Image: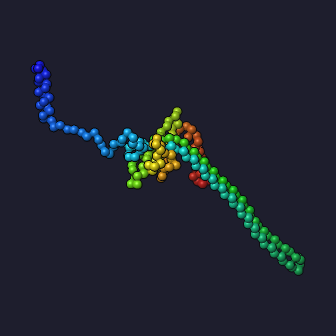
Amino acid sequence: MRPALFHTALLLAALGAALPGRCANLFDANSYQSLTADRRASKPGDIVTILVYENSSASNTADTSTNTNFGLNGSVSTLYAGNNRLQLGTGDTYGGRGQIQRTGRLLAQISATVADVAPNGDLIVAGDQNIDVNGEKTKIHLKGRVRPVDLAQNNTVQSSRLADAQIDYTGDGFITDRSRPGLIPRLFAWLGLW
């Protein structure tokens, strides 16, 4: 044996004797999934795709009409002037009509993370999606509870299956700024004059 190889072998043998051997178990019962296991989200950190298909529509109509009449009649007879009649009447008629209609629609796909698992097994999910197209920024924030039975095999769930759903859709940019009312209409609305 060469002297250099001999010294290296002695050094490795000395280090091996000084360090205790450790072996790690490659099997973890908490994260083990067999090859045929269901790949749907089931624990914190897993990702679920929420298919947001929200349509909302509201309508309110009010009709008001009032009619008020008041009349007073009187007659006076005197020897010199004869019969004099006095008639006094007043009336008021009001009719009002109002209608409010509002329609909203939101279509999106958001990947949300399982934040927690409720005691009954429901998954608490939350996710954000930020989109910036030519300076027009939109943000969708979503959170809610999903029953594991509502998850499809491809790990998706429709937003109509979310319990306690909170879906916020906000925008910022030139188009959003132009769609807001100006300062004077907002002031009149704040004063209740608009």
Q: Nearer the viewer, residue 41 or 175?
A: 41
Which percent across, then down, holds residue 161?
50, 49
Q: State left or right for residue 94 relative to residue 168.
A: right
Q: Nearer the viewer, residue 54 or 20?
A: 20
Q: Quadrant of the N terminus?
A: top left
Rendered image coloring scheme: rainbow
The residue drawn where x is 59% and y is 42% is 179
- The residue drawn where x is 38% and y is 54% is 119
Q: Vertical placement of 19 versus 90: above or below?
A: above
Residue placed most toward the observer, 105 or 163: 163
In the rendered image, which quarter is residue 180 located in?
top right
Q: Is residue 6 left or right of residue 54?
A: left
Is residue 194 among the parts visible in the rendering? no
Residue plotted at (66% across, 58% down): 62
Identify the residue at the far bottom of this view. 79
Rendered view: 57 above or below 109: below
Q: Name the side, left or right, on which 189 lies relative to 12.
A: right
Q: Residue extending furthest top?
A: 2
Residue at 11 percent across and 23 percent down: it is 6
Instruction: Say how many tags the image has.
Output: 0
Q: Position of residue 168 (x, y in %)?
A: 50, 46
Q: Is residue 35 visible?
A: yes
Q: Looking at the image, is 12 positioned above or below residue 45?
A: above
Q: Position of residue 122 (x, y in %)?
A: 42, 51
Residue 169, given in percent of the width and then of the height, sits at: 51, 44
Side (left or right) of 183 relative to 141:
right
